[in-house]
Amino acid sequence: MSIKVSVVVPVYNPGKYIEDCIASLLRQSLPDDEYEAIFVDDGSTDETPERLDRLAAEYPHMHVVHQEGSGWSGKPRNVGIEAAKGEFIQFVDNDDWLGDEALERMYDYGVRNDADVIVGKMAGKGRPVPLELFRRNRPHANVENAPLIDSLTPHKMFRKEFLDKHNLRFKEGRRRLEDHVFVAEAYLRAENVAVLSDYLCYYHVKREDASNAGFQRFDPVGYFTNLREALDVVEELTEPGPLRDRLFRRWLRNEMVERLRGQRLLSLPEDYRQELFDEIHKVVVERFGPGVAAGLQPTQQIVAGLISANRLAEVEEFARWEAGIKPFGSLESLGWENGRLAIGFTAEYRSGGEPLTFRADGEKDVLIPPLSRTGLSAIALLGADTSAPLDKSKVDLVVRERATAAEFFQPVELTREKLAVEGGESVESEASGESRKGRFRQVLRATSLVDPLSAANGAPLDEGIWDVLIRISSCGWTKETRLGSVRTDQAGHGRRAAVVGSPARTVLPYWTDPHGNLSLDVDQKTNRLAYEFAGLAPGDVTVTTSPGRLSAVLPFHVQGECEAALKLTDVASGRSVEVAATLTGRTTGDADLRADLPSGEPAEGHWRMDLTLPSLGAGKPVQLPLALEVPAGGEAVVKRLAAAAADLAAKGPARRGPGSRPAKPTFLRRAVRKIRRTLKK
């Protein structure tokens, strides 16, 4: 059978970090005889060469090429291209890894859409990745209809015939941005680029030792000399005009303006700051016409204008102001609606701990940067746009899986409100068009319905802990913050677990320790579910013996009816009775638990109760904070666990000697401690 995909991995002294990469390649769902991995060892001096030789000896589809060190990734990738036998080539760095189904899904998607390049959804562990590009699947993308230019790393799948046809190869030697040159040309020459967003294909990882090549401080002269080569490719393959300006804008924004903003600039030594600024100024003046900066957001335009005017002092002044601008969110409401978690929140930017304010200038809203008169005059002379396009401000709600950093946008309904800073009265609603006077702040009011069964771009959320974040985009700032630490009482009262879907799954919204942010525990990844029952009272549970039935009202949101399991354990003997149970949703938002008990059960004794809820994996039993006391010939009495333990201790065996006390059963001692800890929380 022919090889579908060749994975090319340039390798240099990765140490332990290569193990995750190797493991992910061995886990691929594509059959072993349909893909290969080619590790190109670029003169490693650690134990990696021997590790790769052992791998290749054990697995026929794993190959290794050893070569003298070339100094960078370009030559190893080119060697891998030449050695590849696959229809497509996927590039992977030696400290990153792939999703288990990445090769199969990307290959099938690329073939189905006749793509020359396939871009799989990425996640960043400690490093940024493109976000807007992966909002949805894009089977027929190009640089005009999709933000492809935001993703210029080589970690994509390329049709080998396409690479050979255009002699697309990486520039070699110790240099920067060879991937920008390669990928930009691939985008511009490709007949079709397919973007796969409904499966997490590629995991970018920042090493604990931060020794990834991309995280090292660079020589500005060499860096921007290499950057000009990427600009050359765009000039060669596009005509002057809006498209070229938009593509150039990516480098102006990401590689120049963003390096000179906020804390990113202020954290640099002053001499390096000056050297970096000088090289950026040269490129801006040499290569970019007015149309490039004109498409930037207002705050980015200000920095770009000051760069053009060669005014580093004002750039630093502006950076000090921007460094104090932070996103802020307040959780206003939380609750389940027909199996979806409704999250209501407000969001805004704050400066120095106070709401960021704007000023009305005729029909325009404008920024109020606290620059000197000289700086403001320079901006005015340059014609940089200081207007604040607040009608385009937006906020996204994102769920991010903690272990993998996989993240997905959730649907948001948004209204924008302008509030005067004096007294907070509304100065203009979106509908009224009333005149505006004075300074004001903008508050974004939003609601989002998170459906655990489709929140991952149409797929269910995987088992795990999903952190909830908001991401505010306004005036050229895009910043994110956790949601939940500031919340209303209403939001707190609406938080409860839910059982959703078929097969049923358990989803628990909870507050993180110690900050109190909102996260979702999907399928009992944590043991927090027991805390939900801490408030159960004896009156919430009833037991009848004719017929034998146990009923309870649980603080759960359940759609319709689903199955559960109940286990009763006699404390004295350890004998257990396991029975099937059902959970049925109530209009109050709670759920009825019902279990039919076998004849004669529970027998005389003290019984603990453990509930197992539905889960895609193996459901974990959760101990209820109540116990059944069944007297001889009498009806069962439900007591709080602590009270039941005290009663049982009081009725224990006779004392064995002077001063001795009846021993509590070990189970009850542990249970009481657990419940007390829970109640304290």
Image (tube, helix red, strand yellow):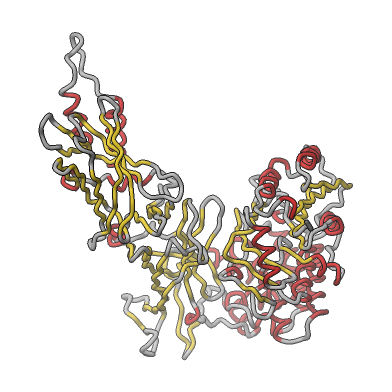
The answer to whether one can see residue 681 in this image is no
The picture places residue 311, in percent across and down from the top left corner, at 68, 73
The picture places residue 542, in percent across and down from the top left corner, at 17, 45
Q: Which of 142/42 is in front?
A: 142
Q: Quadrant of the C terminus?
A: top left
Q: In percent of the image, x 30 and y 54: which residue is there?
A: 556
Q: In percent of the image, x 36 and y 67: which residue is there?
A: 344
> From this viewpoint, which residue is outermost toward the front?
599
Where on the picture, by quarter, is residue 442? bottom left
The answer to whether one can see residue 411 in this image is yes
Q: In percent of the image, x 44 and y 70: which residue is there?
A: 348
The picture places residue 239, in percent across and down from the top left corner, at 78, 85
> From this viewpoint, which residue is outermost toward the left?
634
Position above or below: 378 against 277: below
Where on the picture, by quarter, is residue 623? top left
The picture places residue 294, in percent across and down from the top left corner, at 65, 83
Q: Quadrant of the N terminus?
A: bottom right
Where on the picture, by quarter, is residue 237? bottom right
